[in-house]
Amino acid sequence: MTILVAVVVGLVAGIATERVVGRRAATADAAVPTQAAPPPPRRKRRVGRIVAWSAVGLVLLLIAGIVGGYLWANSIFQKIETVDVSAQLSDSPSGTNYLLVGSDNGRTDADQREGVEGARSDTIMVLHIEDGEGKMLSLNRDLWVANPATGENGRLNATYNAGPANLVQAVTENFAIPIDRYIEVDFVSFG
């Protein structure tokens, strides 16, 4: 669609320029009656100019689109909040393990979480990628595990109350799954 708009804009600009230049030449010729009128411009030159102006317009529009898209994407990526859990991350002997967490961490409207305290991880999954193939394991949030922060037993999603690093440590210690990377998606990400 943008290419079509660029071509039309280029054609209109080329035709308008050609008409203005042609009028000026005709007015200048009428003012000097003693000189012979120059031969009319050949059609090939006019078509060539239209194509050239259309190409210039298209290139400028393409450059503007690329720059605008880059700036927009960069502004979106700058808003992504990062969490440091590097102390709890380890290297898997083979492949890469990602802990994927979908959370309701209480950063939504106060009306939506009235009477609710703490953060909860509603979805907990481990994604293992090795040799270009991926396998996924979903961990039930209600599994009864030892909480590394308190030393007490409780639900897996309750370990997130002490932070993402505690959840990573709980998964590593309770399931013997070394976690290499941590990815969290919350309700703010969808807003």
Image (cartoon, helix red, strand yellow):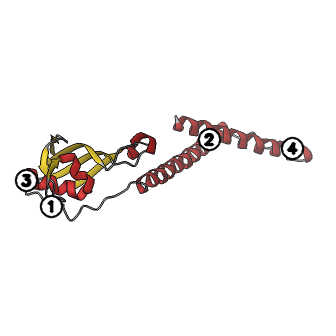
Find residue 17 and report its image quarter.
Answer: top right
Earlier in the chain: of badge 2 and badge 3, it is 2
Residue 10 badge? 2
Residues at circles 4 and 3 in contact by the CB criterion of under 8 Å: no
**Dot 2: within a 10 Å radius of its alpha carbon, few (fewer than 14), some, or many (20 or more) residues?**
many
On the question of residue 131 being in view, the answer is no
Q: Is residue 19 left or right of residue 116?
A: right
Q: Is residue 15 above or below residue 150?
A: above
Earlier in the chain: of badge 1 and badge 3, it is 1
Q: Position of residue 183 (x, y in %)?
A: 27, 51
Residue underneath mark 1: 90
Find numbered disc 3 in the image and state the secondary structure of the residue it sits on: loop
Earlier in the chain: of badge 1 and badge 4, it is 4
**Dot 3: within a 10 Å radius of its alpha carbon, few (fewer than 14), some, or many (20 or more) residues?**
few
- Foreground: 58 or 190? 190
Going by the numbered disc 2, the residue's amino acid type is Gly
Going by the numbered disc 1, the residue's amino acid type is Ser
